Amino acid sequence: MIPLSWYMALAAILFSIGVYGFLTRRNIIIMFLSAELMLNGVNLNLVAMSYYLESMRGQVFTFFIITVAAAEAAIGLGIAICLYRNRRTVYVDEVNQLKG
Amino acid sequence: MLMLLFFCYCAVVIIGTGLLAVTLRNPVHSVLMVLILFFHMAMLYLSLGAEFLAAVQVIVYAGAILVLYLFVLFLVSLKEELRMPRFVSSAWLGRLIAGGLAACLLYILPVFSTGARGNWPAERVREITPTRALATEMYSASVLPFEIAGLILLVAVIGGLLLARREKDSSNTNG
């Protein structure tokens, strides 16, 4: 039997990898992909706890998170396409129109 | 012992492909790395008795969301991506924050103590298959969130259509 804390450690590391990608990459699409990694880290946590605490609540939550992730991907990538169409760039540090 | 080996394999692959996904130069390679990661997540879900979520992980995440990412990647130009720098100029700050966050999370992990147990012991779940247990919980205790999730998907469909729509008058100027 694998202890619950191992799953939680893996989820924490996966979440941190997502944060790392989100904060360092320039490409907005890879930033969204990093956000998906973060969501997956949380999902792993919820499923593991659902198994170890003998409750279905965590799996229901994971189901909703996957739904919201799909919506987020659709909207976010729509915004990325808009950005590319209007500014011809997908690099977040080149989008500085609002900067004084 | 076998489960331990399985978990270690999955953990190593997940961490390795995750790190590769956020550092590789070619975005298409990043997406393919995330594909491998999602499949191993699905394997972990299977070992945790969440077979429905494992199927959803493969179908929705690996099948739908990643294909959407690939489509959008191919819509924007990939050629210049291979020559441009990958990281923002203040990437060291991001590395510091992410490393600090990982250290903090792993440091406070032993303090965590589990709460009260739920009402789905393993025997009961095994009696009426995990998928039916999940459905029973979802359609009884969380009906309202389920409806709201449907509403969110509707908003996403409308929003995606609205964002990706090309304006009539600017179509000839933007080519």
Image (cartoon, coloured by chain):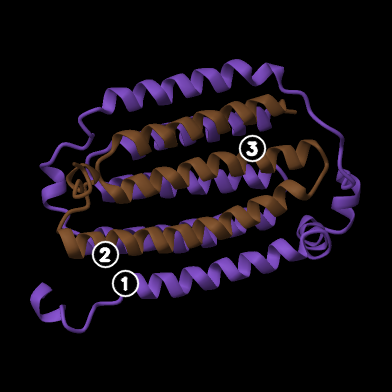
Chain colours: A brown, B purple
Residue at x 10%, y 81% (from the top left corner): B172
Q: Amino acid at mark 1?
A: Ala
How crowded is the residue under tag 1: few (<14 C-alpha within 10 Å), some, or many (20+)?
A: some
Is any atom of residue A81 visible in this view? yes
- Marks 3 and 2: which is nearer the front? 2
Q: Is the C-beta separation of discs 1 and 2 under 8 Å?
A: yes
When the figure is inspected, residue A82 is found, relative to residue B17, above or below; the finding is below
Q: Left or right of B50: which side holds B17?
A: left
**Is B89 or B18 nearer to us in this picture?**
B89
Mark 3 and mark 2: Cα distance apart in space: 34 Å
Mark 1 and mark 3: Cα distance apart in space: 34 Å
When the figure is inspected, residue B149 is found, relative to residue A35, above or below; the finding is below
- Residue A67 location in percent, x, y? 57, 60
Q: Dot 3: what SS?
A: helix
Instruction: Return the disc, 3 or 2, that comes first in the chain's sequence.
Output: 3
The residue that disc 2 covers is: A82
Q: How many marks?
A: 3
- Residue A72 location in percent, x, y? 46, 58
Residue at x 78%, y 55% (from the top left corner): B130
Q: Quadrant of the N terminus of chain B?
A: top right
- Residue B78 location in percent, x, y? 17, 54
The residue that disc 3 covers is: A45
- Residue B10 location in percent, x, y? 54, 35
Residue at x 71%, y 28% (from the top left corner): A4
When the figure is inspected, residue A5 is found, relative to residue A82, above or below; the finding is above
Mark 1 and mark 2: Cα distance apart in space: 7 Å
User: Which chain is home to disc 1?
Assistant: B
The residue that disc 1 covers is: B164
User: Which chain is home to disc 2?
Assistant: A
How crowded is the residue under tag 2: few (<14 C-alpha within 10 Å), some, or many (20+)?
A: some
Is any atom of residue B50 visible in this view? no
